[in-house]
Amino acid sequence: MPRIVPVMAQKAPGDLITGALWNANVKALGDFLTGTPAFWGYQSSAQAVANATFASITFDTEIIDTEGGHSTATNTSRYVCQVAGTYSVQASVCWATNTSGFRASRITKNGTTVPTSEQIIAPVSGFATTAFTATDVALAVGDYIELGGYQSSGGSLSTTSNGGFDYTSYLRARWESN
């Protein structure tokens, strides 16, 4: 069952704060805020992406997944919301060196592009190209977000990964507010 964001109790001046009220409201809210839902996944191996097509970027490694919203076996491109709220989402697609065309990234919610999340960048000779994007996304329990990657090199082009944090595609989501 998904966690519910605790709500602060409303009390009138002069009302007593009982231990039960404290634990159910003040402590519960403090516990939630010190352990808010978060996800951070990345690619530890490259992914081929067809020319001139947005593709969902897959994530086979998790650094953080506090609510179990991501699977490394099924729908590996998706983070499925387990606690409703507004999430701060940051993502990046890192492309292999190639100077033809352009690269893009975007965040989608339930398969639809999140407004203002699409970023386009021109590649630079001799360097891997990283298309970074970030936005806030309101999610209900069961909604999912994905990172889309696009390239127009003229043929298939792979994302790049060194098997760690540097030069790899990633998706991060952190609960910000209810």
Image (tube, grey):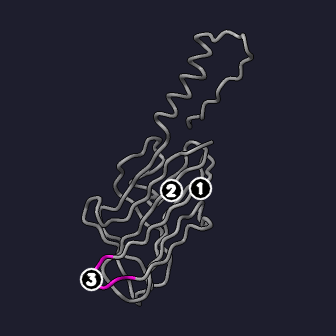
Pointer 3: what residue? 126
Q: Which residues are magenta?
A: 123-128
Mark 2–mark 3 contact, CB under 8 Å?
Answer: no
Q: Position of residue 118 (x, y in %)?
A: 54, 71
Name the residue at 61% across, 51% down.
Answer: 139
Q: Nearer the viewer, residue 11 or 83?
A: 11
> Looking at this view, is 51 or 31 the one in front?
31
Amino acid identity at mark 3: Gly
CA–CA distance in space, label 3 to label 1? 34 Å
Residue of label 2: 89
How far, Cα to Cα, is label 2 from label 1? 7 Å
Helix or strand or loop: what does disc 3 sit on? Answer: loop
Q: Which quarter of the picture shows residue 18?
A: top right
Quarter of the image that includes the N terminus: top right
Sooner in the amino-acid sequence: mark 2 or mark 3? 2
Residue 96's spot in the image, x, y percent? 31, 77
Q: Which residue is mark 1?
A: 137
Residue at point 38%, 89% (across, down) = 100
The image quadrant of residue 124 is bottom left
- Residue type at the position of mark 1: Val
Q: Residues within 10 Å of mark 2 (few under 14, many from 20)?
A: many
Q: Residue at x 50, y 80 (%)?
A: 53
